[in-house]
Amino acid sequence: MTSYRRAYRPAEHRLVGGVATGLAEHLGVPVVYVRVAFVVATWFQGVGVLAYLLLWRLLPLRRPEMSPGLESATRRGLRGGAGGVRGSAVEIVQTVALGAVGIGVLLLIQSTGRGIDDGLFAPLLVAIVGVAVVWRQLDDVTWARWMRQTSGWAFASRVAAGGGLIAVAAVYFLTKEGGWGAAVDLASALVIALLGVGLILGPWIARLLGDLSDERRERVRSQERADVAAHLHDSVLQTLALLQKNAGDASAVATLARRQERELRDWLYGNDERPGDSLLAALRAAAAEVEDVHRVPVEVIAVGDVPLDTDMTALARAAREAMVNAAKHAGVDRIDVYAETDGRSAEVFVRDRGVGFDPATIADDRMGVRASIIARVERHGGSATIRSAPGDGTEVALRVPVRAPEGEPAAASSTTVTATEEVTP
Amino acid sequence: MTKLRVAIVDDHAMFRTGVRAEIDGPVDVVGQAEDVDSAVAMIVEASPDVVLLDVHMPGGGGLEVIRRLHLRHHDTKFLALSVSDAAEDVIGIIRAGARGYVTKNISGPELLDAIDRVAAGDAVFSPRLAGFVLDAFAGTIEVAQVDEDLDRLTEREREVMRLIARGYAYKEVAKELFISIKTVETHVSSVLRKLQLSSRHELTRWANDRRLI
């Protein structure tokens, strides 16, 4: 099947209906020539306007093609509205001037009596404006979007205005012909005629409306697709490119893949927590940071969660320090972090299966452990237990009581003795 | 000892190839399938000891495979293998009848170990699954007095789960609690049974709450 090159009305860069712009593009001539042609044709019994209206109805609207990333970014307000271009100021002024000249000449022709019948001219003008308003309403994407935001009153008023104009034109035309009585007769005749036209055109109009809602649904779908595409483009494709570049560096590859996995998971499962939200969020953020900096996977498992207050912040920082220590010194390819809160106290365990050390030797020279882990949680009423032996890995157990919401400090439950609390340096 | 017969069910050919390369040798990979229908047919025909089962697949996923085979093949044991960490998936497949759950980034030796364990009738809990279990059963303050109580964990089971969540291997858990590995395995299997059989209202609600994640 041969496919013909079709003419379209562009959705962007148009002043009224986009007919002139579309034709100019299709014929390969400057748009101003097409506009002049329409104006000149109008001088002959209004052919130009009729042709314009017909083409407006018949030429399909072409949606701007944007790369998915751009479209999504535009929607989220990250980029300027590239789709909102509606012709430059120069073009508008030019067209208005052209229209003014056209109307002037038309009126001149009218005054010589060689133009459109005087009795028809004024009502026709009004009717055409009405039709233009209604049609514009039907196909304009930008307006449609704006309409949805203003909950329909603009739509109603525009349709009413268009309909009113048509009615005024009809009444004007009819009264001109033969007084009010004739107008009533003709109005009934017109209603019957309209009913007939409705019967003929009804299905077509219904289909038009159906197409509109289909189009809207399709637009929603394509926006979702565009968002997915944009996300994949910004994250996954970038990471894949980085992976190819770093293919020789195993730990870089693992870190990149891991970070991408984390981001993708957050995105897929709609996890948009921020580090300041809760203890778990803070731990996850710390783990992510350690993963990125030290290139060691950190697995965070949690049971329960508490809001972040100063105590919990201290706990999260101490845990972060423990993760950093494990990443730096243990020489492992995996760190396990387990957090548990039961409402009375919060516990965090940071474990590695690395080289380990003798806890007795962490004298004052190991400021990191003493100040940033042990002292920190103790200042907040908690306790820290470090268990390690050379060759047997290390586990840092941290426990901080959760402050009751009423402000009354929860009893530091030191009765529960877990099997790990053996060595307290 | 004869080699274990293992089948791999996953809709990603690349992943099947990768897993096969990692475990073929120590175990026999006797079949592969990429969707529910072919998986059921393959498992019925080859009757492997252990099926590595992907949770998400066209045609209903791993759950559907287990469901359809449930009545026909008691001998086959399932080890769920997935990239998903969503609680709904993890708990769902365990409750359907899988003997364990591991994530796809598990290393070859760990996977072989898990296969052995599942084949022997034990359960395989990753730290994350243990975390989910603790979270799911966390609502109950009182601890089960009788082992037969399906709705609560005993103090010992809770301890075992906590250690697994902290990244301890079974061997390390045993050392930690001064019990034998066999006892650890018994506790874990018992937790698995509770997870599968408990009709506890909270468990259902817990899983439902997390469906939105």
Image (cartoon, coloured by chain):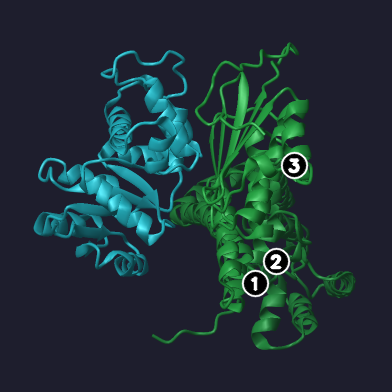
Chain colours: A green, B cyan
Q: Which amino acid does the dot numbered 3 rest on?
A: Ala
Question: Residue A423, position in %: x, y?
Answer: 60, 32
Pointer 3 or 2: first along the chain: 2
- Subunit of mark 1? A
Task: Output the chain of dot 2.
Answer: A
Q: Are marks 1 and 2 in contact (CB under 8 Å)?
A: yes
- Label 3, label 1: how many angstroms apart (C-alpha)? 79 Å
**Which residue does the image show at 38% across and 36% down from the upper left?**
B174
- Residue at numbered disc 3: A363
The answer to whether the residue labelled 3 contacts the one labelled 2, judged by CB atoms less than 8 Å apart, is no
Q: Are marks 1 and 2 on the same chain?
A: yes
Q: CA distance from mark 1 to mark 2?
A: 7 Å
Crowding near pointer 2: few (<14 within 10 Å), some, many (20+)?
many
Q: Earlier in the sequence, mark 1 or mark 2?
A: 1
Can residue A335 be seen from the camera position used here? yes
Q: Quadrant of residue A103?
A: bottom right
| Of the two numbered discs 3 and 1 in the rendering, the one whose residue sits closer to the viewer | 3
Query: Image point 57% across, 53% down: which residue?
Result: A355
Q: Secondary structure at mark 1?
A: strand
SS type, badge 3: loop
Circle number at residue A17: 2
Question: Which one is in front in this view, the residue at disc 3 or the one at disc 2?
Answer: 3
Q: Would you name the residue on which mark 1 appears?
A: A9
| Secondary structure category for the residue under label 2 | loop
As drawn, is B28 to the left or to the right of A211?
left
